[in-house]
């Protein structure tokens, strides 16, 4: 089709107003430009678009009606596109689309996004929670503006900003004898039933932890839900190895649960923000990354991680 979206709009306005002259006034363009658009449209579809009747103006033919009906969704999408791009240039868009590793939603992201909106003003939040495989797909297809996840498994395609590091720790019942230790050796939990946060990459990460220590492990309970892991530990199904502790005040461990650092030296994975924009990030995304960095910096490792003092000292130096 030789028509531009602008020329399609000219034709639709003639159909709506029933007059080339009226469309010319409405669109603030010359009548010759509108006539040229009609000629192109008729050439493209191979039929007349309008019947020109002096007493009734421009009336659409059946072919013209079908053209106009097909054009309306296109013009609506173009209007939305222009509005969204304009909002990007002026400041934050009406909706920010963030993908996150599933457990991060309840753990801390509402607090970060609240900090963002206090800086940018009211904005709609589209927070999509998924495993890392799904996050990669969303990022690659433009479904989200950025993803927040752990730096585990295959690298993401995009610009990576490291926020902090999250060492692994043990979640256990508060009345478990191991809760009396300042730090738990992996050898002390090798014979325990493990509760696995069963998401792609997390199982492989847990295997890596025990393989590095030359130990085996027994998975007795699997779930994709961080909250269900906590509930299963509290119910006595076993212990869990996790990375992040709850930050949100609505997620409280005590009095049933306790968290202890792992005594063995293990490399802590980084929490990252990945985006497709590279060096030319839109302002709202720069603000989001700043909100992430300041949130964890203000919390400090003692609030977001379970670590020995020696490990905690290096968690923000990513």
Image (cartoon, helix red, strand yellow):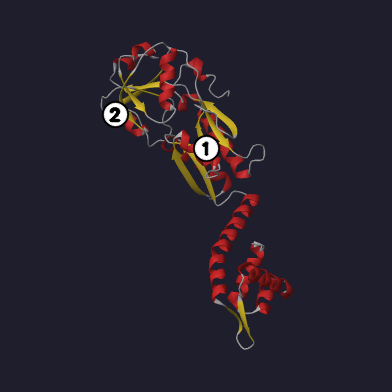
- Quarter of the figure that contains the C terminus: top right
Q: Earlier in the sequence, mark 2 or mark 1?
A: 1
Q: Residue at x 46, y 16 (%)?
A: 308
Cα–Cα span, label 2 and label 1: 28 Å
Residue 39 rendering spot, x and y as whole percentages: 68, 72
Describe the element under mark 2 as helix, strand or loop: helix
* Closer-to-camera residue (22/234): 22
Q: Nearer the viewer, residue 148 or 14?
A: 14
- Residue closest to the eye, 95 or 223: 223
Is residue 59 in view from this perspective? yes
Q: Which residue is mark 1?
A: 147
Q: Quadrant of residue 76?
A: bottom right
Q: Residue at x 37, y 29 (%)?
A: 198
- Residue 112 vs residue 171: left or right? right
Disc 1 on helix, strand or loop? strand
Other residues around mark 2 within 10 Å, as few (<14) / some (14–19) / many (≥20)? many
Q: Residue at x 54, y 40 (%)?
A: 139
Front: mark 2 or 1: 1
Q: Is residue 235 above or below residue 72?
A: above
Residue 138 x %, y %: 51, 41
Q: Position of residue 219 (x, y in %)?
A: 32, 22
In the figure, is residue 193 to the left or right of 243? left
Q: Residue furthest front?
A: 46
Q: Position of residue 87 (x, y in %)?
A: 61, 53
For label 2, the residue is 232
- From the viewer's side, name the closer residue of 78 and 46: 46
Label number found at residue 53: none
Residue 95 vertical placement versus 244 (above, below): below
Q: Residue at x 59, y 75 (%)?
A: 15
């Amino acid at each position: 089709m030789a028509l531009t979206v602008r020329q399609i709009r000219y034709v639709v306005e003639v159909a709506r107003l029933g007059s080339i002259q009226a469309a010319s006034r409405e669109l603030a363009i010359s009548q010759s430009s509108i006539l040229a658009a009609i000629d192109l449209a008729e050439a493209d579809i191979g039929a007349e678009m309008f019947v020109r009747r002096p007493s009734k103006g421009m009336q659409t033919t059946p072919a013209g009606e079908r053209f106009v009906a097909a054009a309306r969704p296109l013009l609506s999408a173009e209007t939305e596109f222009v509005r969204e791009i304009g909002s990007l240039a002026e400041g934050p868009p009406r909706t920010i689309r963030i993908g996150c590793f599933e457990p991060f939603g309840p753990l801390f992201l509402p607090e970060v996004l609240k900090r963002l909106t206090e800086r940018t003003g009211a904005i709609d939040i589209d927070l999509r929670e998924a495993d890392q495989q799904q996050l990669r797909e969303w990022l690659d297809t433009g479904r989200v503006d950025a993803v927040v996840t752990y730096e585990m498994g295959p690298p993401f395609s995009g610009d990576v900003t490291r926020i902090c590091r999250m060492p692994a720790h043990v979640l256990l019942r508060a009345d478990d004898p191991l809760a009396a230790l300042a730090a738990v050796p992996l050898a002390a939990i090798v014979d325990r039933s493990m509760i696995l946060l069963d998401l792609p990459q997390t199982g492989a990460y847990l295997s890596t932890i025990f393989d590095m220590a030359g130990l085996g492990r027994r998975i007795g309970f699997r779930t994709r839900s961080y909250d269900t892991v906590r509930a299963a530990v509290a119910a006595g199904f076993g212990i869990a190895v996790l990375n992040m502790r709850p930050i949100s005040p609505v997620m409280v461990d005590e009095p049933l649960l306790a968290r202890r650092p792992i005594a063995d030296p293990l490399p802590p994975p980084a929490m990252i923000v990945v985006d497709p924009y590279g060096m030319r990030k839109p302002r709202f995304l720069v603000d989001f990354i700043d909100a992430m960095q300041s949130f964890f910096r203000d919390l400090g490792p003692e609030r977001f991680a379970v670590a020995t003092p020696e490990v905690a000292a290096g968690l923000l130096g990513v």
